[in-house]
Amino acid sequence: MRNGGVQMDVALLILRLTVGLLLVGHGAQKLFGWFGGFGLKRTVELLASQGFRPAGFWAVVGCVAEVGGGVLFALGLWSPLGALGIAASMLTAIKIHWPKFWVTQGGFEYALVNLAVAASVGIAGPGGFSLDGVYGTALPQGAFPAGAILVLLGWLAAVGSTRMPAAQRPVQGTIPD
């Protein structure tokens, strides 16, 4: 931890555990159908309906990023990788829920908060009460910014692979809303 002492370490621990474990649960819903989730088959169908191609590939990548990122984030182990996994998953969630903002209206608000938390911890570090802090397993200082560029490029590839579902395509010769 760069500065802030024990209070900052405790605050980061609470934040990492809360967000990391919640995202492990959300990812497990999508991947395994646990905790009342719908499982991988339905996740693939959802991504296909949103135009992601190949939907199976992006579903597995997204679920593994959310579960794996959440585990690493909660433990504070190789923290930039955990934060980047969460960021990748949340960027996809934002794309799916766009353009609605408020979560009560099916929007991307919750995903944006998780993205901000992941980016903040990725930049600040996991704190002293983390496996990185205890065992000295932290990745090099530039790992998060470099990884963020790669995540953004991967996200752009995923979004670029999407096609508007036929039901949402404008009829030839009409102007879309």
Image (spheres, helix red, strand yellow):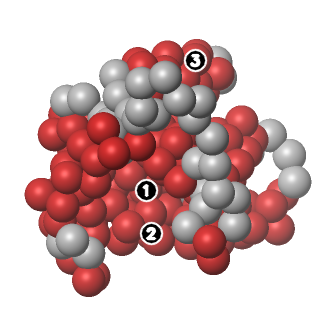
Give the CA separation, mark 2 to mark 3: 25 Å
Query: Can residue 37 be seen?
Result: yes
Mark 2 crowdedness (10 Å alpha carbons): few <14, some 14-19, many ≥20: many
Q: Nearer the viewer, residue 95 or 20?
A: 95
Q: Secondary structure at mark 2?
A: helix
Residue at image x 44%, y 63%? 23
Quadrant of image for the N terminus: top right
Q: Mark 1 sits on what residue?
A: 70
| 64 w.r.t. 164: above or below | below
Q: Residue furthest front?
A: 173
Q: State the image quarter where residue 176 is shown.
A: top right
Q: Residue furthest right?
A: 4
Residue at image x 53%, y 54%? 97
Residue 53 lies left or right of residue 135; in this view the side is left
| 98 w.r.t. 11: above or below | above
Give the CA separation, mark 1 to mark 2: 6 Å
Position of residue 99 measured from the top left corner of the image (x, y, whole percent)? 63, 49
Q: Residue furthest bottom?
A: 36
Mark 1 vs mark 3: give the one in front: 3
**Number of numbered discs visible in the structure rendering:** 3
Mark toward the start of the polypeptide (2 vs 3): 2
Tell me the number on the disc at residue 149.
Answer: 3
Q: Residue furthest left?
A: 41
Mark 2 vs mark 3: give the one in front: 3
Q: Nearer the viewer, residue 99 or 103?
A: 99
Q: Mark 2 sits on what residue?
A: 21
Quadrant of image for the C terminus: top right
Residue at image x 21%, y 38%? 55
Position of residue 48 measured from the top left corner of the image (x, y, whole percent)? 24, 43
Amino acid type, label 3: Ile
Amino acid type, label 2: Leu
| 153 w.r.t. 177: above or below | above
